[in-house]
Amino acid sequence: MEVKRNYQKELDRVIEDINKKKTKPKLFLHSCCAPCSSYVLEYLSDYFEITLFYYNPNIFPEEEYFKRVQEQVNLIRCMSFKNPVYFTLGKYEPEVFLSMAKGLEDIKEGGERCFKCYELRMREAALCAKAKNFDYFATTLSISPLKNAAKINEIGEAIWKEIGIPHLPSDFKKKNGYKRSIELSKEFGLYRQDYCGCVYPQLAK
């Protein structure tokens, strides 16, 4: 019988090792949106120097994409961090997402299309992290109760093996992370979107 992994405990062990070494590793962190990143930044900026990477070609329409970008930029400007947090904006290339989703348009949300979307965004983050000599890459996606943390970590580990940049394990909804993200969203007046951004769940309504 396969033992269910606790990714929060695995992250705790990584952080414990960092603290012992008294280092400040560089983390390239993919963000799906400002509300989800709020708690993750608050939490991880104590231990890492973070570059937040906004790359979400799944978001539709274009106006929604840039609205979410601006919320992300505003959040970083407003929050205080123990260690530096930088921002880098990826390309908006919805054609890449649509090509990836071809043949999966009718799959229910939370299924294979979503998993491939996770991989698309995480892979781009890993490639950038590798090119810029970061110590780790990660994503904020696991904070959502609607996202499959085990699948996210499985994808991250597969990319690590392929590309050679360590994936930081996570299940950010643990330790009341999702609840804290809601509190921070209220505190900073963040726009909390009512859909992931992908066009297909909207078409299914």
Image (cartoon, helix red, strand yellow):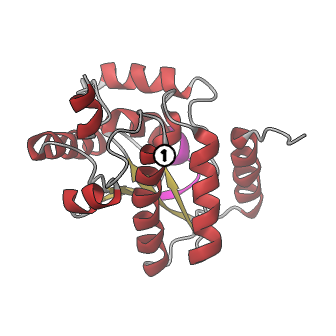
Q: Is residue 84 visible?
A: no
Location of the N terminus by quadrant is: top right
Reply above or below: 29 against 32: below
Q: Is residue 193 magenta?
A: no
> Amino acid type of disc 1?
Glu
**Residue placed most toward the observer, 45 or 150:** 150
Q: Where is residue 131? Give x, y as percent.
A: 44, 80
Q: Residue at x 52, y 55 (%)?
A: 138
Q: Identify the residue position indicated by label 1 in the image.
A: 112
Q: Is residue 58 left or right of residue 81?
A: left
Give above or below for 105 relative to 165.
above
Quadrant where the C terminus lies?
A: top left
Q: Residue at x 43, y 27 (%)?
A: 181
Return the x and y of residue 161 as percentages of the image width and height: 65, 72
Residue interval drawn in magenta: 43-51
Question: Does dot 1 land on a helix, a strand or a loop?
Answer: helix
Q: Residue at x 24, y 45 (%)?
A: 59
